[in-house]
Amino acid sequence: MTSILQKYLEKNFYKTGSLFANGLVGIGEILNANPTVKREAFDLGVWMGSLFQVVDDILDFRNDGQLDKESLKDVRDSIYNLSVFSVVAKKMDDSKSASSFLALYTKKDKSEDEIRYLFEELSQENVRRHCEAMVAMLATECEKSLQRICNNLHDKNDDDSRSIFLSEMRKIVEMFHRRQK
């Protein structure tokens, strides 16, 4: 299970976390921020990238009765996402069940019935609740990173920058949080 979570977290970092992180460090460079602020901006970007990815994962498995090609792409391609990790974690008390699920999930050339079964497992309410709890935790971590950045902006000229930066970053975090609801 650790390797599944590890693959998921690595994917999030390389797919979105590094993009957000380096973008925020770039803003720090433009604003001539101190090294502590740039380091915190990088961390904030990693948290924001993870938040974005988790929300995206939730949206992939919203079961509204419609199974479209896009929402089934992760299942067809055996892409690890938070829903997969949640299902496996739920099944860990029965290692055979967890192994069977993973074997089917990673199988090449799945049948349509297998894809539908996997989608149903990944769309369960308790899996969605677990993912939504992860969104709340990541939003909290983003807020903590924002506060650390603001606390490290020392110059009086930074007052305007601090309030603008904090306001804009909170809007982004709120947008991700609302998007998953």
Image: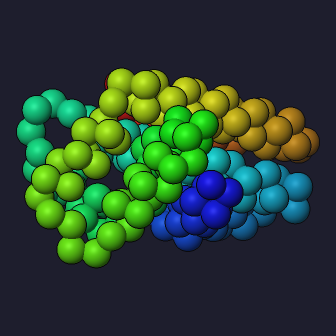
Q: Is residue 166 left or right of residue 125?
A: right
Image spot of residue 21 (x, y percent): 63, 61
Using the image, determine if residue 175 lies above or below residue 8: above
Residue at image point 11% right, 45% down:
67
Image spot of residue 125 (x, y percent): 36, 24
Q: Nearer the viewer, residue 58 or 51?
A: 58
Residue at image point 60% right, 37% down:
93
Q: Nearer the viewer, residue 24 or 66?
A: 66
Residue at image point 69% right, 63% down:
25
Q: Nearer the viewer, residue 62 or 147?
A: 62
Quarter of the image with the N terminus in it: bottom right
Q: Is residue 76 left or right of residue 79?
A: left
Quarter of the image with the C terminus in it: top left
Using the image, determine if residue 53 lies above or below residue 86: below
Q: Nearer the viewer, residue 115 or 156?
A: 115
Residue 92: tell me if it is visible.
yes
User: What sort of colour scheme is used for the picture?
Assistant: rainbow
The picture quadrant where one finds residue 30 is bottom right
Residue 169: tell me if it is visible.
no
Image spot of residue 163 (x, y percent): 67, 32
Residue at image point 88% right, 55% down:
36
How many discs mark residues in the rendered view? 0
Using the image, determine if residue 141 lies above or below residue 45: above
Q: Is residue 161 left or right of residue 147?
A: left
The picture quadrant where one finds residue 102 is bottom left
Image spot of residue 14 (x, y percent): 55, 70
